[in-house]
Structure formats: structure tokens, C-alpha cells
Image (cartoon, helix red, strand yellow):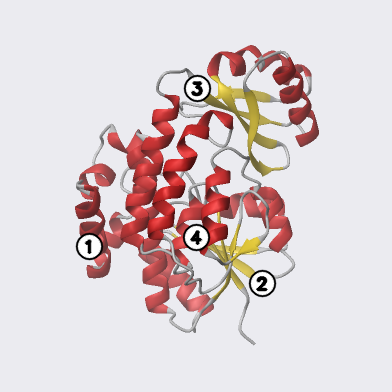
Amino acid sequence: MSKKIAMIFSGQGSQAVGMGKDFYDNSEVAREMFDKAGQRIGVDFKEIIFEENEKLGQTAFTQPAILLVQMIAYKLFTDACPDTKAELFLGHSLGEFSALCASGAIDYVDAVELVHKRGSFMQAACDEIEAGMMVLVGLDDASVEKVCADAQADGKKVWPANYNQDGQLVVAGMKSDLSSLEQTFKDAGAKRALLLDMSVASHCDILAPAQEPLAELMEAMVSDSFSAPVVSNVTTKPYSTKADAVALLKDQLVKPVKYKQSILAIAGSVDMAIEFGNGAVLKGLNRRIAKELTTLNVSDMASLAKVKEEICS
């Protein structure tokens, strides 16, 4: 009996200089995908990804670079294992767009342009303000939510943004408000409260101006051609229509990523997960969220060969 597999994709923060180079050096398919994606948005992805530069840290370029490497990893896997099909697709934040692309609902070149512009919309929403994000370690969800709710009642702009795993939650908002709450979070039990090096406040009300432009682009690019459902970061439930994709990914800009809850929701319905793209961020999270869910990863040619041997032999 074939295994039920969730194909999963990480979000912003998983990028690194040199990611995908092993694919590029060893695969003509990868080189073609680099070229086509770069032509669409007028950049040389080899320079952005393989060389030290400022652009890889800029949201408008970080997002398409991550998605491109993930889609190359996924394409090479599907070429190597054509009979292996996904039971469902799942991504973390930006990764949900890669999941949508892997499902067949949007072409990867269109997706590169879409997330390039998404990054620009997000940055524009934060350009005139000092926005940021903070990671909290060792504090339960309810305590984080209470601190945020109390702070909002006092006029502060701070929201839960990423539910990564038990004891690790990222909050977003105005940088000054986040800084002012550092001791409050620690007094509530946080072992660490660390401001991240980010100029965008993801998954909170600050990004409301980006919602309509993103939805308009998605209307033009997304189709109803889903090979399997995509699990929503917002609802933790699967969807498989263009209308739902547009509505939910528009919503995702201002609502928290429920990654932990999504993994718990699917753990009993799949046999394993395969993470595509640089590193193995989600593999590590999954190990701590649902130990029974085996997670493999495809991040270079060696890991591709290993997964092929395990899954497709």
C-alpha cells in the first residue's frame, strides 16, 4: 500500500546564501528554472542566492528566492518519483504559496512574480513605521495571547503571529511596543524574548494595506487545478479551490500562522511528510510537535537521492 505523504514547505527565515547551488550545478532542469524565474522579475537569481549581497535579506527578493529553490527541489523529486503523489500540501507562512504551486494551482514562474510582489506590498505597508517581530521561548500560548490582549487594551499594537511549536511563538507589531513588553513576557514566564532582525510585521493588522493588491494578483494567476488539497495556515483545514486560496492567503497576511495546530491536525491522516527547499526547519519543528510523524527533507542532490531510495524504490 502506498504511503500517504504531506509535501511541506518552510517560510521566510529559511534562506541562506548558496541554497540550491547543488541543484543548479547538477541539473539542467534547475538551471532552466533559475533562468525563467529571473527573466520574469528581471533579476539574476544566481547573484541573489549564490553571492553575498543585500537583496537576499530584502523581503521582495527573499520570498521568490525561497520559493524558487523549493519548487526546484519539488520538481526534481517528482521527476525522480513520478508515481509518488501527495495526500496534501502544507506550508509555513510564505511556504503556503509554494504548497499552492506544488498542488498545480499556480505555475511556478507566476508564483515567483506573485511572492516578489507580495514581499513588496508587505514592505510598503511597513515603510513609514518601525515594525518588527519578536520570538518568545518557554511561554505557553494562552499567556502570550493574554499579554497581547492586555497590551492592545492599553493601545499597543502587538499580536501573536506564528504558532511554531509548544513554547515557541512569534509575535508581531510596532517595534517600540514589542520592546516595551520584553520584561512583561519574561515576568509571565518566557525564558527568552528576542527582537528579530526584521523590518516587516507579518501576520498582523499592520499588513492590511497589502491584502487587496495581493488578492487582485491571485485572481489573475491562480486556477482550480489542485492535484491535492492545501492546508490553510489560517484555519488548519484543507482547501482545493481558487476562491478559497485567494480568500485564505489574503487573510493570512493579517492572521497568525497556525503551523503547530496544522501539523497536529494532519498527523493522524498521513504516514509521513517531506520538506522541500533549503535546510530542514520544519523537520525539526515536526519532531517536537508530533513525534510520530516521520519527516524527510529534500534540500540538495544527496538528500534527494536518499529520499528517492526510501520512498520510490
SS state under label 1: helix
Compute the Cα span from label 2 to label 1: 33 Å
SS state under label 2: loop
Q: Residues within 10 Å of mark 3 (few under 14, many from 20)?
A: many
Q: Read off the residue under disc 2.
A: 271
Amino acid carrying mark 3 in the image = Ala
SS state under label 3: strand
Residue closest to the eye, 204 or 181: 204
Q: Give me the disc on residue 99.
A: 4
Residue at 54% across, 60% down: 243
The image quadrant of residue 68 is: bottom left
Residue at 35% across, 43% down: 117
Residue at 44% across, 25% down: 126
Amino acid carrying mark 2 in the image = Asp
Compute the Cα span from label 4 to label 3: 27 Å
Q: Position of residue 147 (x, y in %)?
A: 75, 22
The image quadrant of residue 161 is: top right
Amino acid carrying mark 4 in the image = Ala
Q: Give me the disc on residue 131.
A: 3
- For marks 2 and 1, the one nearer the N-term is 1
Compute the Cα span from label 2 to label 3: 40 Å
Asked if the residues shown at circle 4 and circle 3 are in contact, with their CB atoms under 8 angstroms apart, the answer is no
Q: Residues within 10 Å of mark 2 (few under 14, many from 20)?
A: some
